[in-house]
Amino acid sequence: MAILPIVRLGHPALRRPAEPLALGRLGERPVRRLIDDMIATMRDAEGVGLAAPQVGMAIQLFVYEAVDEDEPGGGIPLRVVVNPMLEPIPGEMVYDWEGCLSIPDLRGLVPRHPAVRVRGLDRDGGPLDYVAEGFEARIVQHEFDHLNGVVFLDRMRDLQSLAYYEEWEEFLREAATRPSKARPE
Ligand code: NI
């Protein structure tokens, strides 16, 4: 397995819509290797999710995992999601902090749907159909956005909460998130 370079904001790969992966290609060695490398890269970077465009591949594929059960929202097992479709479950938008491996050191408050139905394929081409809630729903929406050339900054209602990690830890971490407001998407 290899640790892949993660592209950062400004790289055109982050703004390019990803293409669906042909089902037959899922078993191919380069794709299997890409998935393994993305998992290794996410873990190495201590991220909770990574989408293929972040490693320069315009493929509808992302991985996520939040194993640290001591962290809020932790205990989410590894998922590999290919060619996803998301369907928001109706509910008030929820604001919480997000960061991104492609936008290092920054955090901001982002509104997300509280739950989403995820449909797609797993790494073996098997069907996926499940509901993600809470922190997992947030991760899924963040990673899905990457497949459409969207980053969390685009989803912020305003940039007032944008902060560097160090300052966020010092001043903002404990601050209450703003009341959520429904927004049609
Ligand atoms: Ni990201």
Image (spheres, rainbow, N blue to C red):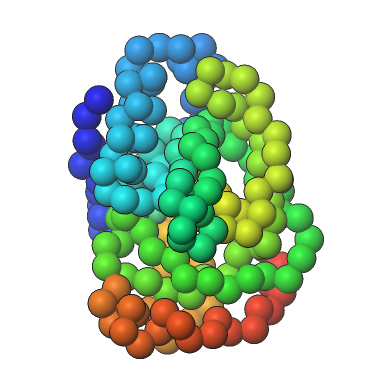
> Percent from the top left, x then y, of residue 139?
52, 53
> Percent from the top left, x then y, of residue 124?
53, 18
Front-most of residues 154 and 47:
47
The residue located at (33%, 43%) in the rendering is 42
> Percent from the top left, x then y, of residue 115?
69, 56
Front-most of residues 184 and 51:
51
The residue located at (32%, 42%) in the rendering is 43
- Does 3 sit left or right of 93 as displayed? left
**141 lies above or below 35:** below
Question: From where the camera sits, is residue 138 visible?
Answer: no
- Does 107 sit left or right of 4 as displayed? right
Q: Indicate the quadrant of ligand 1 in the picture.
A: bottom left
The residue located at (31%, 50%) in the rendering is 46
Image quarter where the N terminus lies is top left
The residue located at (25%, 55%) in the rendering is 8
Image quarter where the C terminus lies is bottom right
**154 lies above or below 25:** below
Quarter-of-image position of residue 84: top right
